[in-house]
Amino acid sequence: MSALRSFPITRVDAFADRAFTGNPAAVMPLEEWLSDDLLQSIAAENNLSETAFLVPDQSGEADYELRWFTPTVEVALCGHATLASGHVLLTAAQWRNEMRFRTRKAGILQVSRDGDGDAYSDDPPRLLAPPRNRCPRQRPRSAATPSKHCGTTAAIRWSPIAMRRASAR
């Protein structure tokens, strides 16, 4: 019988301004990739819309490699689980302002802190679509509209982060 292994897992509510709202995602930072079958089994056990798995990136293109699994299949892109992953890593690395993720099908993604304490999503990545221009402010900022940019609001348990398609350094 093999010894049981334990792995860290964090559940994060994305697109929320308080706990127990928004889109939940599980985030599991790993030291190395587990088998695809084991990743799929863990995601099925979590039974959330997505579980994000991260390993340190060895290519030099990003900080981490990121993959997303639903309870039944690996997916090409998941915005809320990307934000959740950035939240977990940036919370652990308070001296950092951004995390870059290399993905298998969506390219390089970046999650960054917003300097004024808001959490927002700026130009979320879209597959097979041209880059989107930033739009002008659509309405005044208030507690009901925590994002100062148009697009998807992405507050993650009061943690200031933002996601955008990463530009070349």
Image (cartoon, grey):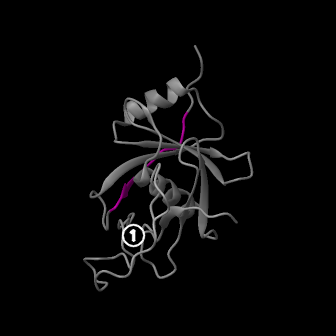
Across and down, in percent, residue 89 comes to 56, 57
Please indicate whether residue 159 sits to the left or right of residue 18 in the image: right
Give the vertical position of 40 relative to 116 (above or below): above
- Observer-nearest of 165 and 36: 165
Q: Quadrant of residue 141?
A: bottom left
Quarter occupied by the C terminus: bottom right
* Front position in the image: 68 or 92: 68
Count of residue discs:
1
Q: Which residue is mark 1?
A: 158
| Nearer to me, 18 or 97 | 97
Q: Position of residue 104 (x, y in %)?
A: 58, 41
User: x%, y% of residue 85?
Assistant: 50, 53
* Rendering coords of residue 67 (x, y %): 53, 41
Q: Is residue 101 left or right of residue 39?
A: right
Disc 1 element: loop
Q: Amino acid at mark 1?
A: Trp
The answer to whether residue 12 is magenta is yes
- In magenta, the rendered stretch is 6-15
